[in-house]
Image (spheres, grey):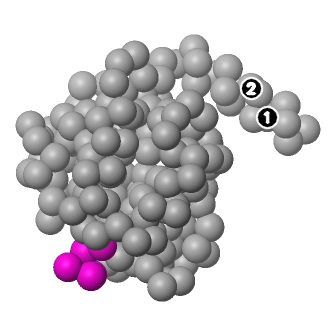
Amino acid sequence: MIEKALELRGVLNAYKTIVDGAWDNLHPGMGGGTLRWSAAGADALGQELEGYLTAAAQPPREIRVFWKLTDELIYSGCNTPFARDAGFRTPRQMVGVTDFCETIPWTRQAAKYQADDREVMASGQPKLFILERQAREDGVFWLFTSKAPILVNGAAVGLLGLYETIDAARAMEIRRRMEDEFL
């Protein structure tokens, strides 16, 4: 029970890191949540996380949320829009698989994604505002992604990611703004 609570607290803290840095107004109740998490049991933490996953999945944005644990980067949870993108009907079906699962549409890009995931875990630092293309059988999609390490007792035990599927015009606008900031 304590291990599950530590894992959930790590997931919630990673979620807060991303929301604070990149996903403003995703969930208005995030501020101050850390104080509750320090004393909350696994059931309370699970209910709070479920609330955030549900809020993220609401139209029109439908933010996809997922987290992976262990060095093998095994999916340990996600919200429904992410499960659908991965070809599953429910989030529960994602638990225990990796990006290399043959049924996942982005399996050809699995090595790239996992290299990026490992970089986040090794550095212990989030990567925010990643603009990336994802090739699937049903087309090419643009994703606006952020990732943060899941820290338990200061050690990275996994990572949490959020992404939003965006259209090509918005992707080009974001790319242009990012280039302008660096020039």
- Give SS at disc 1: helix
Tell me the residue at 52%/19% (across/down).
168
User: As drawn, is 144 to the left or to the right of 177?
Assistant: left
Q: Is residue 119 visible?
A: no
Residue 91, visible in the rendered structure: yes
Residue at the image point whose x is 40% and y is 71% from the top: 39
Tag 1: residue type? Glu
Q: CA distance from mark 1 to mark 2?
A: 5 Å
Q: Which residue is mark 2?
A: 176
Q: Is residue 156 above or below residue 149?
A: below
Name the foreground residue: 66 vs 131.
Answer: 66
Task: Residue 3: say if magenta.
Answer: yes
Residue 85 lies, in percent from the top left, at 24, 35
Residue 183 falls left or right of residue 73: right
Residue 179 placed where, x, y %? Answer: 79, 34
Q: Are marks 1 and 2 in contact (CB under 8 Å)?
A: yes
Which corner quadrant of the image does residue 183 belong to? Answer: top right
Q: Amino acid at mark 2?
A: Arg
Tell me which segment is drawn in magenta.
1-5
